[in-house]
Image (cartoon, helix red, strand yellow):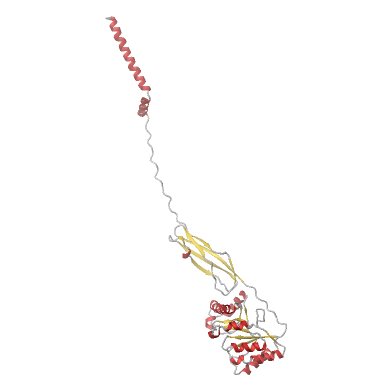
Amino acid sequence: MREKKRNIALIAISFTALICLLAMARLQSPAAVQTSAAETVPTATASPSPTPTATPYAPEAPELRVRGEDPLILTAAPEPYADPGCEAWDSLDGDLSDRVEVSVEVDPYRAGEGSVSYTVTDSEGLSASAVRRVIVEAAPVPAVEEPAQPVVYLTFDDGPSVNTPRLLDILDQYGVQATWFVTLTHPESTELIAEIANRGHTVAIHSASHDYQRIYASEEAFFTDLLEVQDTIHQLTGTRPTMLRFPGGSSNTVSRFNPGIMTRLAQCLNDMGYVYFDWNVSSSDTVAKNTAAVRDKIIGGISGNSASVVLQHDTIGLSVEAVPAIIEWGLNNGYIFLPLDEHSPTAHHGIAN
């Protein structure tokens, strides 16, 4: 009996030990550790990823770039100012060049400095601007050369006309060259400009219209008229003359409806390097009653001058018929006859406006 009780006690002890070992093994296993940790360590909660923020659109002003040179340097000339322009663009509208507003403050007729302003506005109302400097320089002025012997310069205004062929033949007869200050007022005779040049005479500018109110309205009006004649001469002769005579002469008073216009025009021509001629012997052929009166007036004016710039009109027949007697008298009295060139005496009058 005592033995049996001892065995039961041993079995109980062994069972208890086994339970203890199993419990220890469970505590030491990874699962247990994880379970324990899960029970004792708070679980971290992942923060949500931030939502990407779009960069706000920042509109940019257009860009402007002037074409050509800046500053732009020109020589004074009768042609209107021609601007090289500019380019404009931006990232939204692309090419904006056709939207550029241009303000020109340039006087191409005289030496000085001006500017051209450019402004452009895009579809968002943003603007850009640029300014070009324009420098207008004076051209060299031909020097006047005094003749070495007494000389007569026969000059004829307002042609060519129906009288031109007769006048050309007279001059050929004596081997004399003269000067025509031509107009375009007789379109049926305009082609004769080429014949005048072909026969060795000087072709210079007078006026396209000879309309005082039109040509003296402004500097721009005057040079528009001048260019019309100059272009025609160039087409017919291949040359572009820079010599002229003002309609009415530089001392005219018919231009006084535009105060100071003659003073300004004379300065412009000087800056361009052009030469204008007046006269110091007038034929008065516009009021003369006959050829003898024209002849005597001219011979009286030439006498005593070392250089005579004679004013006649191609359009007046009685004046043309006086030319043989004038040439004969001049040759017999030691004068030579020459056409004007840019170095000839100019016989300038005092400007009266």
Q: Nearer the viewer, residue 249 or 286?
A: 286
- Is residue 318 visible from the viewing direction of this image? yes
x 28%, y 7%: residue: 5
Q: Relative to 39, does residue 1 appear above or below in the rendering?
A: above
Q: Give the quadrant of residue 15.
A: top left
- Is residue 260 visible from the viewing direction of this image? no
On the picture, is 299 further left or further right than 236?
right
Q: Position of residue 230 (x, y in %)?
A: 57, 78
On the picture, is 216 further left or further right than 169?
left
Q: Relative to 342, does residue 287 appear above or below in the rendering?
A: below
Quick one: quadrant of the C terminus?
Answer: bottom right
x 34%, y 17%: residue: 20
On the picture, is 144 further left or further right than 117?
right
Q: Relative to 47, does residue 349 appear above or below in the rendering?
A: below
Q: Nearer the viewer, residue 275 or 258?
A: 275
Q: Position of residue 286 (x, y in %)?
A: 58, 90
Q: Position of residue 63 (x, y in %)?
A: 50, 59
Q: Relative to 307, does residue 118 appear above or below in the rendering?
A: above
On the picture, is 148 further left or further right than 242?
right
Spot the residue most to the left: 1
Q: Give the quadrant of residue 339.
A: bottom right
Quick one: quadrant of the N terminus?
Answer: top left
Q: Position of residue 86 (x, y in %)?
A: 52, 64
